[in-house]
């Protein structure tokens, strides 16, 4: 979808001036998406549909089901093959593409638990500080934002360009632990026959990690539409309802998951100054949203 084909000039002006966004839109436009089948992909597509519903824009999502690395998909968005993607953000990503700076997961991916060998639990239980944890090597995908965060905080990080291979690499003890967002590891292990692995039960890594929609640098109209739709969904409460529903109904997140875990705080030097950390409503609160209140 080229920017010039999304809306007529009158509709764009109306949007920027806060008028009727749909005015002047004669036909349904198409937004092209690559869908990899991960639960976060389903969450992102649903949130995008919610955003467009908030502003009554006649847009059809054209979804191509395929598997691609984050780096590959980024290049395809930059070249215009796809119109929008979603990813944990880095300063490099925000320079190469146009981010919509509303954290889609309210920072939830910055709460990380570890997949480990079941026999190693006691070693992790004895961890008390960040320095203690640095004795363990971590596995991550080569192009994930979290890889840079872990390296910047002094961890040895073993990488792979293939996300599924990281599980077998852990089984083979190529590294000691595989950090995952707190909504991810139980489903991932349930989908794989890897009885030697488990979710570590005493620690949680914490750092600010926005997960944004991104579009091609010059696709200002689509970026503005998504931003406006997300802002409206925040104001109406539909964003938080959607988020909370997914935590429990889709991600099957145990409300007690953080209770009793030692919090290991990391810095995130990949954040840009534009990260909306001051907007508290954009970040989830463990004592409310996590428990569905």
Image: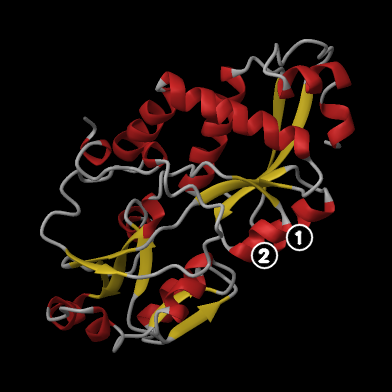
Q: Residue at x 57, y 74 (%)?
A: 142
Q: Residue at x 88, y 29 (%)?
A: 5
Dividing the picture into quarters, in which one does residue 9 lie?
top right
Question: Regarding mark 2 in the picture, which secondary structure is present there?
Answer: helix
Image disc number at residue 57: none
Report which residue position mark 2 lands on. Answer: 71
**Drawn side of residue 51 relative to residue 133, left or right:** right
Looking at the picture, how far across and down is residue 86, in whole percent?
A: 59, 48
Q: Are marks 1 and 2 in contact (CB under 8 Å)?
A: yes
Looking at the picture, how far across and down is residue 144, in whole percent?
A: 54, 67
Q: Is residue 145 above or below residue 228?
A: below
Q: Residue at x 37, y 72 (%)?
A: 178
Looking at the picture, how far across and down is residue 33, in whole percent?
A: 69, 41
Report which residue position mark 1 lands on. Answer: 75
**Drawn side of residue 14 relative to residue 66, left or right:** right
Q: Is residue 87 visible?
A: yes
Looking at the picture, how far across and down is residue 179, in whole percent?
A: 36, 68
Label 2 CA crowd tier, 10 Å (few <14, some 14–19, many 20+):
few
Question: Regarding mark 1 in the picture, which secondary structure is present there?
Answer: helix
Q: Is residue 180 above or below residue 59?
A: below
Distance from Cα at disc 1 to Cα at disc 2: 6 Å
Label 1 CA crowd tier, 10 Å (few <14, some 14–19, many 20+):
some
Quarter the C terminus occupies: top left
């Amino acid at each position: 979808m080229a920017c010039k084909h999304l809306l007529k000039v009158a509709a764009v002006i109306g949007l920027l001036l806060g008028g009727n966004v749909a005015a002047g839109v004669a036909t349904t436009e198409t937004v092209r998406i690559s869908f990899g089948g991960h639960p976060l992909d389903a969450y992102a597509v649903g949130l995008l549909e919610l955003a467009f519903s908030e502003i009554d824009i006649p847009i059809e999502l054209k979804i191509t089901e395929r598997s691609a690395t984050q780096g590959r998909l980024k290049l395809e968005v930059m070249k215009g093959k796809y119109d929008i993607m979603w990813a944990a953000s880095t300063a490099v990503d925000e320079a190469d593409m146009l981010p919509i700076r509303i954290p889609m997961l309210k920072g939830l991916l910055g709460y990380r638990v570890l997949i480990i060998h079941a026999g190693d639990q006691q070693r992790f239980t004895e961890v008390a500080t960040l320095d203690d944890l640095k004795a363990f090597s971590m596995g991550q995908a080569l192009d994930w934002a979290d890889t840079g965060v872990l390296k910047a905080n002094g961890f040895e990080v073993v990488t792979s360009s293939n996300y599924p291979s990281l599980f077998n690499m852990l089984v083979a003890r190529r590294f000691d632990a595989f950090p995952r967002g707190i909504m991810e590891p139980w489903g991932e292990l349930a989908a794989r026959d890897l009885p030697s692995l488990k979710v570590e039960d005493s620690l949680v890594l914490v750092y600010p990690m926005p997960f944004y929609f991104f579009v091609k640098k010059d696709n200002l109209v689509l970026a503005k539409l998504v931003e406006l739709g997300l802002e409206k969904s925040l104001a109406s409460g539909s964003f938080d309802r959607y988020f909370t529903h997914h935590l429990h109904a889709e991600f099957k997140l145990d409300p007690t998951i953080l209770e009793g875990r030692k919090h290991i705080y990391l810095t995130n030097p990949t954040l840009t100054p534009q990260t909306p950390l001051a907007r508290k409503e954009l970040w989830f609160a463990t004592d409310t949203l996590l428990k569905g209140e």
